[in-house]
Image (tube, helix red, strand yellow):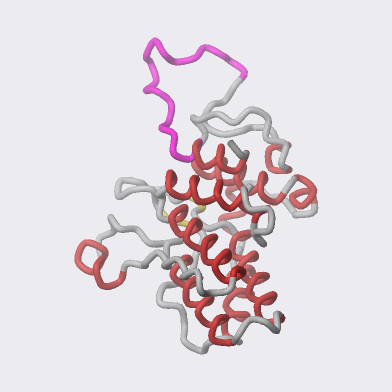
Amino acid sequence: MVLASACVTLAQAQGPSPRGTLSDPEDRFVFRNAPTSEAFSRGDLGVLLTSYGRVPLYEAYRALQMGPEFLAKERRETPGAAERKDQGKEIARWLAARETVTKEPPRREIDYFRRANSSSYGAFVNCTPGAIELATKVLGELQANRNVQPKDVKAWVDAQDAVFGFCTYEPFGEMALTTARLFAPSVPEALPASEPKLLRQLRQYQIAAAHFYVMRYKEAQAEFEAIAQQKDHPLRAWAA
């Protein structure tokens, strides 16, 4: 199983058993809710525990995709500071790039965070800045590709809007109880075999990402693994 898929599996795992039971480990030097080493934020993950919260597991997923060399170039902050500081530059860049294709605003506002369930007081990172940065990069490459028609670029942007619609979508939310059928995002559909291979491969990745953001992890894992097996897939490195 590829490393990124392992993080997807960990993200599905349940938390530790209730405190005070005989199954509680007695290791005094291990904090089981989150990593305590600063090396973790630099991509030195060590041993990933299923008891970690979702934010550390998503950080691990990003580290495995981007690589420690990339993370070493980034300015690291504590989780509290990261939430307080404006982290919207990747979203702003994506919206600016998107505006070169369509002037219509996205149907849903894009953000990084969402709640896991209706009883959650906190939020976790559902769509990472790196994922939004990747979308901006892919859009630029499509626009520069003379073999890709403007209508196909617009279709890709529309599908990406649907993908990012799941970043903040909470089907259990108060508004969703009455408007889910009308406003719920839709997972993009696979392209027919008659479409160019590049466009079909990019849509394949969009479908896997949408399933990941909507927390359908088993489907996302299988789809990312299928992408990782394609040596000529343009986004193979992000799925492996």
**Left or right of 1 on screen, residue 141:** right
Q: Is residue 125 visible?
A: yes
**Residue 51: where, in percent of width, then height?**
49, 30
The boundaries of the magenta stretch are: 10-29
> Going 65% across and 59% down the picture, which residue do you hit?
233
The quadrant in which residue 74 appears is bottom right
Q: Main secondary structure of the magenta part?
A: loop
Height in image: 174 above or below 4? below
91 falls in the magenta region: no
79 vs 136, nearest the viewer: 136
Instruction: Pick out the residue farthest to the left.
Output: 178
> Going 45% across and 66% down the picture, which residue do you hit?
190
Instruction: Pick out the residue farthest to the bottom.
Output: 103
Height in image: 105 above or below 89? below
> Going 41% across and 32% down the picture, which residue do you hit?
14
Quarter of the image for the N terminus: give it: top right
